[in-house]
Amino acid sequence: MLVVLVPNAPHQDLIITPPKGGLALQGRVKIPGDKSISHRALMLGAIASGTTTIEGLLLGEDPRSTAECFRVMGAQISPLNSHSVTVEGIGLGNLQEPPDLLNAGNSGTTMRLMLGLLASQPERFFVVTGDDSLRSRPMSRVIKPLHQMGAQIYGRQGNSLAPLAVQGQSLQGIHYQSPIASAQVKSCILLAGLAAEGETTVTEPSLSRDHSERMLKAFGAKLTVDPQQCSVTITGQTGGLTGQKVIVPGDISSAAFWLVAAAIVPDSELVIENVGVNPTRTGILEALALMGADIQRENERLVTGEPVADLRVRHSALKGCTIGGDLIPRLIDEIPILAVAATYARGTTVIEDAAELRVKESDRLAVTASQLNRMGANITERPDGLEIRGETPLTGASVDSYTDHRIAMSLAIAALTAPTPTTIHRAEAAAISYPNFIETLEQVCSGSV
Ligand code: S3P
């Protein structure tokens, strides 16, 4: 297997040339830290009092954006590494007014969660921006509820697009019925609720990832969860948060690439170590099980409030299935790689209720369908999903990540079984959430993991 990264200024192409005579993936894979938990550990550490230590932080570009924003606002965050990062918190109401723009880069989580904190800093003014992709993503979903709490936030196109200007205010608690199951929306409102007067409740149509709830509780917030109603209540102004030790588990969204790789490449068996298996994130395991994948959990344990396991996956024949409803928020980031698995499944796989994918780092429904179809897949876009007719063996092609990290990595896994080389344009995007993806890909393919 030949995996080569070639400069194609200002981007990089990844060329994957499969070996003659087949490939079997064997060994144990270590994955980087969870992106969602990494963001939250940095943010809560910054607004807590005292020291937070973070082990296993993701060193991707997204958490780097979060760290940089909070450094500019006064938190002392040691140089980022995956062993131990310390954050000297400055206390909830003490974020300093930055002299320049806060840049969230490509990271929706940075921008949306941070807005909840900025909105509640009276007498301070902030301007938040991001890259081309982030400046085109909808921010009204957090700005509307923040306005209801009394926030002053202004942006392009009727206060919906960044750059956004925030004049910090004292906020009031609200009960917000979110029209979408989004952890970014929920977490933004909860973070605003920390400093607001009274109680703030967020109710979602179905449960999104609950890392904020778990970590806020661990840092000392007064928070109650009603899982039956998909509802969380935080009490504001209760004396602030206290720094903690956070051990970040591996990201199941990064593990998903190896789960699918081993499932579709004949004679493969991989163990993916230290994977976060929080039930609000394990939709990918349920979806792959429905498709007939052979995945076992080993060594299950709880690590600083988050469930963790090693995952053993073996190649198996896959079959099509229908994925929708409450499962979607629990595998929201895994749909592009699930689509790759579906091209190897016998029969039709239907993904529905997933219109949210159109407003991710790229329009992931359009890009997944168009790029996998270039490789020989038979995928039809639906307004809210995909219809994937399998089994369609994929062939090498020239494809594009559209600067979306999860698309870049999904296409690289799709290329593993193609008989001819695949070139993935703008493949450097993988570093947003998985900085050593290409290195690990080489190791997994050469049997040296
Ligand atoms: C995230 C929530 C999800 C997910 C994103 C990370 C988070 O976004 O897609 O990658 O850390 O809260 P939405 O809340 O928009 O669904």
Image (spheres, rainbow, N blue to C red):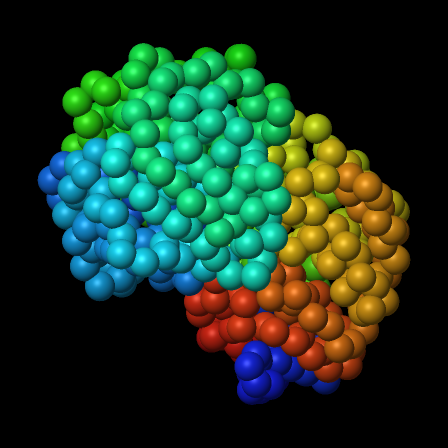
Residue at 23% x, 42% y is 95
The correct choice, above or below, for 333 with respect to 179 in the image is: below
Residue 289 coordinates in the image, percent (x, y): 67, 40
**Apparent side of residue 189 relative to residue 336 in the rendered image (left or right):** left
**Apparent side of residue 409 relative to residue 418 in the rendered image (left or right):** left
Residue at 80% x, 61% y is 370
Residue at 61% x, 29% y is 180
Q: Nearer the viewer, residue 436 or 384?
A: 384
- Quarter of the image containing the C terminus? bottom left
Residue at 46% x, 46% y is 164
Q: Nearer the viewer, residue 424 or 122?
A: 122
Residue 326 coordinates in the image, percent (x, y): 65, 27
- Quarter of the image containing the N terminus? bottom right
Q: Is residue 341 visible?
A: no
Residue 216 coordinates in the image, percent (x, y): 30, 30
Q: Quadrant of residue 391?
A: bottom right
Residue 397 coordinates in the image, percent (x, y): 78, 76
The correct choice, above or below, for 104 with respect to 419 in the image is: above
Q: Nearer the viewer, residue 72 or 320?
A: 72
**Apparent side of residue 80 relative to residue 251 in the rendered image (left or right):** left
Q: Is residue 78 visible?
A: yes
